[in-house]
Structure formats: C-alpha cells, structure tokens
C-alpha cells in the first residue's frame, strides 16, 4: 500500500522528555505526570497501561496537543509541539492526528457517513472527495451497509467502529485511542483493537492506545506501564498479533 501524501517519514513519530503535569486541588498541587519520557514509532502500536488515576489520559492529552504540560518537551513528527501557537497546534491535530475515545463522541443527529465526512470537510476536502474517502473508511471497518444509520440505531461496537473510521479516514500519522474498548464486550473489543493494529501496519500510523485491559497486550508492539505518574516498565513485544 502506498504511503499517504501527508506522511512524514521518520522512525520515531513521537518523543517526549521529562513531562510534568500538576493540577491544583484546594491549596495544594497534585503531580499527575512526573518526569515522564516516552516514544512511539510509525507502524507500531504502543500500549500505555495502568490503573485509574495513574496518569494515562493526562499523558495522551499532553502528547497529542490537548493539554499543555507544566514542564518537558514533546517532539511530534520532527517538531517541538508545544512551542507552536495554539492555532498551529489545532491545525496540527486536524492534519496529522486521529482520536478515538471510550465514549465514541458521535453526533446523535448525524448518520455514519456524515460522522466521517464532517472532519474531512474541515480539512478542506470537497464534498464529493469527502464522501468517497468516508465510504472507503466505513467499508474498511465493515460498516458500508450502515452508511445512513444514526448512533441510536447502532450497537456499541458499531459506534466505536464509526469512531475509528472517522479517525483513520484522514490517514493520520498519529492515532490516539483512550480506553477504546472499555465500553465494549470481549468480541467487539477484539475487533476494535485489530482495526487499530491495521492502522499501524497498513497505514504506517504511530498508534498510542491507553487502556487498563490486560487482554490488549497481545496486540501491542510495545507495552508501557504507568502508575502514580511514573513509567514503571517499558518493554517490546516481539510477536504482536497482526
């Protein structure tokens, strides 16, 4: 498969050094990230695992330009992410990042097709081009027969697959998934993680998946364990499932 035209060639897609994030609670500050170093590579699934409150979601927000760290640096696709102005960071996310969340984040009034085309139109795609790309993305996740259905007519697994189609339709270089299987049963969870793995293997995306579900480790190239805002372990998985 040919690489998309907006792909930035690099082995390391994302690196972070010394990330610190504090939140104020009353008169004190709680340090949620404590000098965290991180990297993710093109074509790989990096799984970030840990219990609730460990700093997983805060880490993914800092890495993706959603939440500015108090200290440290994030290098995304060869550039210092947090040195950019806010508008440039927004544009970076639009052009290069895909997001998948546990709550699906779908618009209740829009059909599956419309859910996907809306993001493509923000990128400047024509109506016809956005429709073509969206249909291909929904077909890729097995939902071509559901183009005109709204979220209320779909199962949880189907909703999450729409969210994945919306994220991968842009062919992002960075794909972030925050607890993407937590609202799903085991079978649908496996479908979702296999689709994320496909995004890495076939589209050369760097996939960063935050989860507390140990069953997903088999689908990762690297597994990072975080607890109390610190990285406790970082290991490669030699034979991730395809």
Image (cartoon, rainbow, N blue to C red):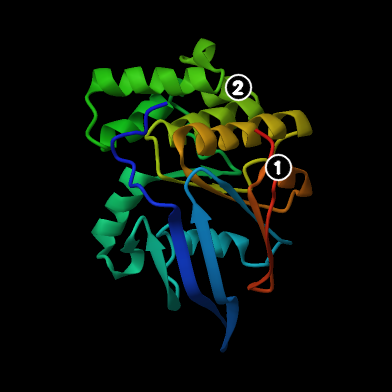
Mark 2 or 1, nearer chain start: 2
Q: Which of 185 and 236 is in front in this view?
A: 236
Q: Residue at x 29, y 40 (%)?
A: 6
**Residue sticking out furthest to the top:** 145
- Number of marks: 2
| Mark 2 vs 1: CB contact within 8 A | no
User: Distance of mark 2 from mark 1, alpha carbons?
Assistant: 34 Å
Judge whether 82 appears above or below 60 on screen: below
Q: Where is residue 205 in the image (x, y as percent from the top left)?
A: 46, 42
Disc on res. 32: none
In the rendered image, the quadrant that contains the C terminus is: top right
Q: Position of residue 220 (x, y in %)?
A: 65, 46
Mark 2 falls on what kind of element? loop
Judge whether 114 appears above or below 20 on screen: above
- Residue 210 visible? The answer is yes
Judge whether 151 appears above or below 83 on screen: above
Mark in the foreground, 2 or 1: 1
Q: Which residue is drawn at 69% across and 47% down?
A: 238
Q: Which of 24 and 220 is in front in this view?
A: 220
Disc on res. 239: 1
Mark 1 falls on what kind of element? loop
**Residue sticking out furthest to the bottom:** 27
Local crowd at mark 2 within 10 Å, few (<14), some, or many (≥20)? some
Q: Which residue is drawn at 64% across and 37% down?
A: 193
In the rendered image, the quadrant that contains the N terminus is: top left
Local crowd at mark 1 within 10 Å, few (<14), some, or many (≥20)? few
Q: Which residue is drawn at 70% across and 29% down?
A: 188
Q: In this view, does 157 lie to the left or right of 176?
A: right
Q: Where is residue 21 in the image (x, y as percent from the top left)?
A: 51, 75
Q: Name the residue under label 2.
A: 154
- Residue 111 visible? The answer is no
């Amino acid at each position: 498969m040919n690489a998309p035209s907006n792909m930035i060639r690099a082995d390391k897609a994302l690196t972070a050094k010394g990330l610190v994030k504090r939140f104020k609670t009353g008169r004190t500050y709680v340090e949620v990230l404590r000098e965290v170093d991180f990297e993710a590579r093109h074509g790989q699934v990096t799984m970030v695992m840990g219990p609730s409150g460990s700093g997983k979601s805060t880490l993914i927000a800092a890495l993706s330009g959603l939440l500015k760290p108090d200290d440290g640096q994030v290098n995304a696709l060869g550039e210092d992410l947090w040195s950019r102005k806010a508008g440039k960071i927004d544009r970076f996310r639009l052009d290069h990042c895909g997001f998948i969340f546990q709550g699906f984040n779908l618009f209740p009034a829009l059909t599956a097709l419309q859910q996907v085309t809306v993001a493509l139109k923000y990128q400047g795609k024509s109506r016809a081009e956005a429709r073509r790309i969206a249909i291909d993305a929904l077909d890729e996740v097995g939902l071509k027969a559901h183009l005109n259905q709204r979220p209320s007519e779909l199962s949880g697994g189907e909703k999450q697959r729409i969210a994945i189609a919306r994220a991968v339709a842009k062919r992002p270089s960075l794909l972030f998934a925050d607890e993407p299987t937590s609202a799903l049963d085991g079978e649908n969870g496996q479908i979702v993680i296999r689709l994320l793995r496909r995004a890495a293997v076939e589209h050369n995306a760097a996939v960063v998946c935050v989860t507390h579900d140990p069953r997903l480790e088999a689908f990762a190239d690297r597994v990072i364990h975080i607890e109390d805002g610190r990285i406790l372990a970082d290991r490669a998985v030699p034979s991730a499932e395809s």
